[in-house]
Image (cartoon, rainbow, N blue to C red):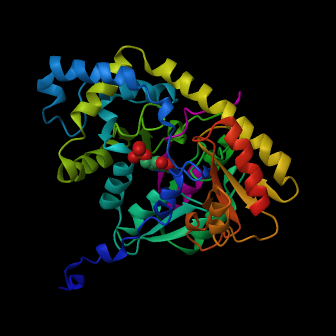
Amino acid sequence: MNFDRYFSRDANSFRPSAIRAFAKLINDPNIISFAGGVPNPETFPAERIAVLAAQVVRERRHVALQYGPTRGLPRLCPAIAEIMRERGVACTAEDVLTTTGSQQALDLIAHTLLDPGDVVAVELPTYIGGSASFFARSAELAGVAQDDDGVVPESLRELASKRRIKLLYTIPNFQNPSGRLMTQARRDAVLQLAEEFDFLVIEDDPYGELVYVDGADTTAMKSRDTTGRVLYLGSFSKVLAPGLRCGWIVAAKPLLARLEIAKQAADLCSGMLDQSIVDELIANGELAPQIERVRAFYRGKRGVLIEELERHFSGRAQWTSADGGLFTFVTMNDGVDTASRLNDAVANGVAYIPGGPFFVDGSGANTMRLTFAKESDDRIREGVARLARVL
Ligand SMILES: Cc1ncc(COP(=O)(O)O)c(C=O)c1O
């Protein structure tokens, strides 16, 4: 039977992830993989999670195994508000809606704010899961240029002058896929444009805690949002474990109230077991030392990857400094089409993610995303040497 006539208009706008297809490259041990988009399992506090999971299941089954409030576990919301205050944002528990990962936040926001044809401005390049949420509501995505300081205000102004933008989606801290950190001056410029052209801003921040250099200013845009235009998304995926589907939205109360209703329909509440484990970790003061461990784990790997890129690709390519997060983004000077070279690379035992799918305007064929999260220092060295031979 052909089911096409049953699909909704939105379902016909769904876009499968162009990079999930590459995921199989991550697991072959013969292939040195820069292709992953996931944290390294060695950073997961697995033993502590095991202990706390057993504890909350045995001692607090009426909470951890029960339905809970849509807003979130009552003790976790103020703990998240405290995290937000540390990030410079005036926030109380009433400003927080927990979500099933920040991916759900993107979906809920798209569902709540977007009508078919609405224009969402996204960075060039941008996170595929973000674009997928907007495409799934039949929105139109328009690209905004990015340089090493983040969103280019002139490009955003030009777009906003031509099209009625409803939402801007930005990842200011160590963006996926580019690894870039937006300067505070650029954040101010973006906020000013949001005021001038009357659009809302999604500030997606799963990587802000993964900092590897001194002096990186990751202060949230939301901290200077005086009119409530910014919807801030946070997540424990990169500092604890993404299998604990635990993220959150901080937004103006009228927006949050509507998002809460959308969430009631989506899943009633996020996993209470996951939230209970995260809540216990935070209450025990275990989050800060865990973040330090994660930073230390990635800092060295990031250094090795950047050093090897300098050794093998100087003069042939440019790459972002990846002062935090999980990725560096490489742009080949000579217009090499990275997608067409991937099979060759894999045959030579190295994998990466071609950058094209991250650009909604169809550009970026000569770019690629590399993660330093997965491989050992030695394999990173060997992997970059292989890459240099193939490209
Ligand atoms: C920029 C960005 N936003 C959101 C997500 C989704 O994260 P979560 O596990 O919190 O749903 C990711 C995951 O990689 C991401 O890179």
Look at the image and tell me in which quarter the N terminus lies.
bottom left
State yes or no: residue 211 in magenta: yes
At horizontal 25% and vertical 34% (from top left) the residue drawn is 72
Q: Is residue 240 above or below residue 48?
A: below
Number of callouts in the render?
0
Asked if residue 143 lies left or right of residue 265, the reply is right
Residue at the top extreme of this rendering: 284
Q: Quadrant of residue 243?
A: top left
The picture places residue 145, in percent across and down from the top left corner, at 66, 63
| Residue 361 seen anywhere in this rendered image of the structure | yes
The answer to whether residue 78 shows anywhere in this view is no
Location of residue 94 by image quarter: top left
Tell me if residue 61 comes above or below residue 111 in the rendering: above
> At 37% from the left edge and 72% from the top edge, which residue is drawn?
138
Residue name at image x 53 percent, y 57 percent: 25
> Which of 368/42 is in front?
42
Q: Where is residue 359? Give x, y as percent.
A: 59, 66
Q: Magenta span covers which residues? A: 190-216
Q: Quadrant of residue 79?
A: top left
Image quadrant holding the C terminus, namely bottom right
Asked if the magenta segment contains residue 374, the reply would be no
Residue at 79% across / 59% down in the picture?
389
- Residue 260 percent coordinates (x, y): 24, 46
